[in-house]
Each structure stands twice: as C-alpha cells, then as structure tokens.
Amino acid sequence: MTEPLTAPPGTASDPTTMVQLLDAEGRRHHHPEYGSFAESLDADALRAMYRDMVLTRAFDTQATSLQRQGELGLWPPCLGQEGAQIGSAHALAPRDFVFPSYREHGVALVRGVDLRDLLPLFRGTRHGGWDPHAHNFHLYSIVIGSHTLHAVGYAMGAQRDGDVGTGDPGRDRAVVAYFGDGATSQGDVSEALVFAASANAPVVFFVQNNQWAISVPTTTQSRVPLVRRGSGFGVPSVRVDGNDPLACYAVTRAALERARSGSGPTFVEAVTYRMGAHTTSDDPTRYRDRAEEDLWRTKDPIVRMRTYLAAESLADDAFFARVGEEADELAAATRDHCRTLEAGPPETLFDHVYTAPHPLVAEERAQMTEFEAGFTDGEGEAR
Amino acid sequence: MTATPLARAINAGLRAAMERDDKVLLMGEDIGPLGGVFRVTDGLHKDFGPDRVVDTPLAESGIIGTAIGLAMAGYRPVCEIQFDGFIFPAFDQITTQLAKLSYRSRGDLQMPVVIRVPYGGGIGAIEHHSESPEALFAHTAGLRVVTPATASDGYTMIQQAIASPDPVLFLEPKSRYWDKAEVDLGAEVDLSEAGVTTGLHAARTVRPGSEVTVVGYGPTVKTLLAAAEVAAGEGTEVEVIDLRSVSPIDFDAVTESVRRTGRLVVAHEAPVFFGPGAEIAARITERCFYELEAPVLRVGGFHTPYPTAKHEEHYLPSLDRVLDAVDRVLAY
C-alpha cells in the first residue's frame, strides 16, 4: 500500500489523480495530457452531449415511474451516471462495438438503440430487445462481469480480421466493455484483463465506479483504488471524473485511439455516483446516508454541463427549452409504448432455443400447443 | 481406409474443418506446440499458426467467454478443456451465456462454438481427471452434447459439430483415444443441415439382437459390445445401441429396438442418480409401457465422488455389471 505509484505506459499522469476538464461548477479546465482530446468538440457536439444526457435522464426517470406503476417488473436506474455514459459513448465510432452491463441506457441512446427497446427485458416480454449487430451494441448482461470476456473475444476477432492497427480510420476498430465497481471483484473480469493483456486486444475496460454494489461500498470490493486493478495486469489505467462528460469523452477517446492503433487495452475508472437505487427492488436508505447523496447531488453532470454551455454562450434559452420539450415527448412516448408491449403467443417461448431444428423442443412445443388448444372452443375463444 | 486411433481421427477432422473454413480456430491450454496433453491438436499449430491454434492463458472461463465474443465476431471457435474435471470454472459461461444467446437475442446471434472435453475414467488418473459431467450439460437447453465411441465417428462428428450453428459439447472418451479402427480420412462428411441436426445425433445399432437392448455411448460402447459377445456365448442375443448423442437423444431408435426386445439396460460412467439413464428409462417407459417385459435397468457410477484409481474398476460399468443387469431384466 505504501509503494510509490508509477505512471503506467501510455499515461503520463499519476493514475490515482482524476482527470477533470469540467468541474462541478461548470468551469472548463485544461489537462496537459487529455485536454487536447476534447478540443475538437465544437458547440454542436457539446450541445449534443447535453441533449443526450437530458433525454437519458427523462427516459430513465420515466422507466422508474413505470416500474412503480406496475408496468415494468424491475428497473435499474442510471440516474447520476449520465456524464460517464454519454461522455464516453460520444467518443465511439460506429464501427466500434460495445458490451454493456444492464445500466447503460445512455450508451444505448448514443448507439442509436430506440430507448423503448430497453423496456421489454424489464417488462418480461423479451430477454433482449434489439439486434446487437444493428447498433454494434450487445444485449444487456445480467450476470455481473460475464460480458467483459465476450468483449475481449470480440476484440480478438477484430484483430484476426485485420481491423486493428492499419492506420485507416475507416477500418480500425475497438471494443468497449462497460461494467461497475462490483464487477471488478468477479473472476471473469480478472480473466478478461489477463486475456486482453495476453492478446494485446483492442479493448477499453470502462468501469463506472458508482460507489455502491447494491448495498456494499467500493471499499469492501477493493483495498486499493480500482484504477490500480488494471495496472496489475499490465493494462494502462486512468482515473477520470465520471460526472464530467468532457473528461470521460477525452479519456475514452484516447483509449479508443490507442486500442484501434494496435497498442492494446486500457482500463478506465470513471468515478461517479448512483443517485438512485441499484434497482427498483432496492432501498438505499437502509445502507447509506442522505448526506452522501446530497454531496453527490452538487456534482450533477447535467447541471454542470448546462452551466458551462450557458456561461460560454454555447447554447441559449431556446435550445434548453427545445431539449426540455423533446425530453417530455420521449417520456410520453416511452409510457405509451411500454403499455403496448406483449410477449406474444405462449408457444413462441420455444423459439430460438436452438438455431437448427431440435426434436425435443419440437416435441414439447407440440405438446404444449395441443394442451393449450384444449382450453379453447372451435372458434379459438377461451372456454 | 487406414487403421487410426480415435485421437488421430479427431485430429484429422479438426484439420479438415480448418482447411475448409478459415473462420475455424482452436483455443485451449497447451494445444499449440505441445499439441494438447492428449496430442489431439498435434501438428496443427505448426501448420495453421498461432492465430488459429491459440495457446490461451490458463483460465477456463476465459476460454469460453472469449470464444463467445469470437463467435459474435463471425468465428467458429473450437475450445479444448484439458480435462473433464476442469470444465467447472467455465460452467457459468457455458450455461448462462453460451447456451442462451440465441434464445435471448431471438436468433440475431448464433453461437457455433464447440467445446472438446476428454472425459470419463478408466485410465488410472488422479482426482478431477476421470469425470463424466454430461448430464449437467444435457440438462441445459441450448446446448448439444455428443460423444463419439469410434475413430470413424471421431473424424465425422467433430466436423459436423464444428458445422453446427448451435454450441456443441464434444465429449471425447479418453480411455478410447488410442483404440484404432479403420477410418476413411478422405471420406465426404455430410455437413448439410440434415447432417448436422440428424446425422450428428442419430443413434447407431452396433450389434443386432432380439432379447435385450443395451444402450450406451462414448467409452461404454466397447464394454457393451464385449458383454454382448459373452452373452451370445451363453445363448442370449443382446442388441447394442451407441447413442452417439446425449442431447438430443435419438429416442426413436431406442424405442424401435425396445418394442422388439421388451427389455432395456442403459449404461454410462456418469452417476446413475439423475444420470442420462434416468431420462432414457422414463421416456422409454412412457413410449413402450405395454411392450416392456421388465423395468429399465441402469448401470453406472455410484453416488460418490469419482473414486481413487485403485477403486475405479468397481465404480465403472464393467462387463460383469452389464451382464448382471442383462440377467436381471431377463429374470422378470
């Protein structure tokens, strides 16, 4: 615990200090290593980030309400983590591939997933909801940390496809695995870091350290800052203010460029806070103080971005009003759509267990169909 | 036709699949220059290179988890788990991820991943090297579980497994690795959908008989044939069926046989309790209730951890235990 930290290769900064470009008061700062990666963000790009954060929060808040109304069985809110998600996702190129956990609603939005397609999983009408290849955005992974290995394997595929280190920006690609502080304790995450380092795979491990793994704090998961988990595996690591979308953008962009160029994986710890419950089944008042939540409320990513945009005249009141209206419309559309979602006929539960025909599945489907038919009359109406 | 041991026949099948499709790659522990601890991948690293014959870090969950990602990227990984007893660190990735991704994605994703596992006992090994975990995987929807008993099937079935769009557990009876048989290594293998879905899973009658049906797969087939030979000398005609597939199971073939013989014995090295024989007994009882002359009997491992090497001959379904079961079904 006392040995001096040395900067890992690829990062000149001390990995325990936090990269920050936009502080909690909305003031822009320069960073000697990462500042340049955010300089290309013009007013349009900055406004787009703000808009995506606001839309994500509106959707997320609406989904939480839908669970409270009984329309969803469960919802994992991303409230408070919009800066980490939108900032990092804006650094992605379309060819890059994302492996999310189950809370990356903001990343889904940026990847072009219709946010309403996130609902069926939590309403109990589907296990997925979107085509991963259509958005280069994998399905949500519920088994904590399991998908980090899939990300590394996919990146190994990109290497074999010759899509790494060509120098052609239209060809080179990278993979991002999003996971949380709790996942860093999982063996699969350690194995993913081992495999990524071994293969020098083009992967960015993006940890949103939201301080709580349901009720257990990060300090129970790790005796050292999570950022040091990466360097132990030989993976360059950097810590960033996760409520600062600009810093998250810059750090992720640097890591992606490094990965696409063939220089290997990077581990990012984005320090943020889960303002809501783990899921709607959880009660945070049982394990954490209101004062802690109040402190983090002052670091809100959307508030600081709005302050910055307004102070620098990068956006006017009309823009903020328009985004607010758009958010209201998204919330209403989410509500309306959710109530229309149905699971389909019961015999479809046998669909896609296997890709190729399978006699047992066919037999059981036929038995179930016959059984169900016994409850209807000749016209197909229930008896 | 060449007299070829099972291990070499699987090697030849792997080579043929790799030559046919450059998306096929092998991954596992010590499968590169060493050729695997059983030498099943011997020579392939030299001929196909380290990108297609990947010596992975020593982490089974990592092997299967990264294979899933490679499959998403369009590859057809063939993973080797070094020994049956070492598959359990990968059990989560196999059962919660690999088996379910087609279902969860409603077919948007396919998982053409093969997991090769040397399995079973009888080689005098230390613990964790002689297990038969097939029931655990047969119990998991989304997986296919097959096991060749002969060199010829080793050559054919590994190619069909690699061609399968679904994940396949390919269980290799390690006690039979060096058993030789005539194999046509240049033979055309049926890789059509029918070949992969029906051919790969079709049971095979390896000895016809009229009085008792005995069913096994993998390492027990040789034992069953030997038992049938002894029984024939005693005047009992035993029909031997090699299931070849534990999921799905070719119940039609077993049903057809039992309708003629009226008697069924199932043998496997896996523990009898909740083993594949339990499922076969239940299904055949349902299908052949009025043709059965005796209850279906099972011969297999006991409800103990796999015993020490010096005890394994008493644990495994030996020729004598199979004959004892044959005698008992005939006594009803």
Image (tube, helix red, strand yellow):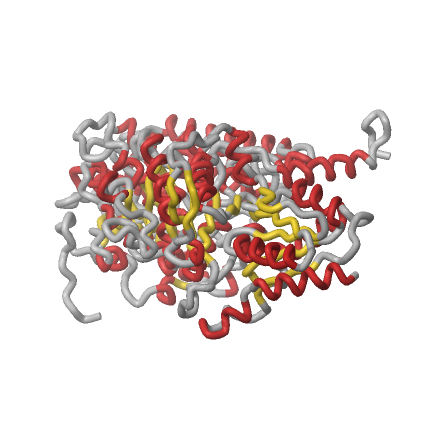
Q: Is residue B166 left or right of residue B234?
A: left
Q: Is residue A318 left or right of residue A41?
A: right
Residue drawn at the location 60% of the way across and 43% of the way down: B205
Q: Is residue A30 visible?
A: yes
Q: Position of residue A271 (x, y in %)?
A: 32, 53
Q: Is residue A80 above or below residue A136?
A: below
Q: Is residue A193 above or below residue A311?
A: below
Residue drawn at the location 54% of the way across and 59% of the way down: A283
User: Which quadrant of the figure contains the C terminus of chain A?
Assistant: top right
Q: Nearer the viewer, residue A263 or A358?
A: A358
Q: Position of residue A12 (x, y in %)?
A: 13, 50
Quarter of the image for residue A343 reads: top right
Q: Nearer the viewer, residue B324 or A89?
A: B324
Residue drawn at the location 28% of the way across and 37% of the way down: A174
User: Which quadrant of the figure contains the N terminus of chain A?
Assistant: bottom left
Q: Is residue A102 visible?
A: no
Q: Nearer the viewer, residue A195 or B186?
A: B186
Q: Position of residue A158 (x, y in %)?
A: 29, 35
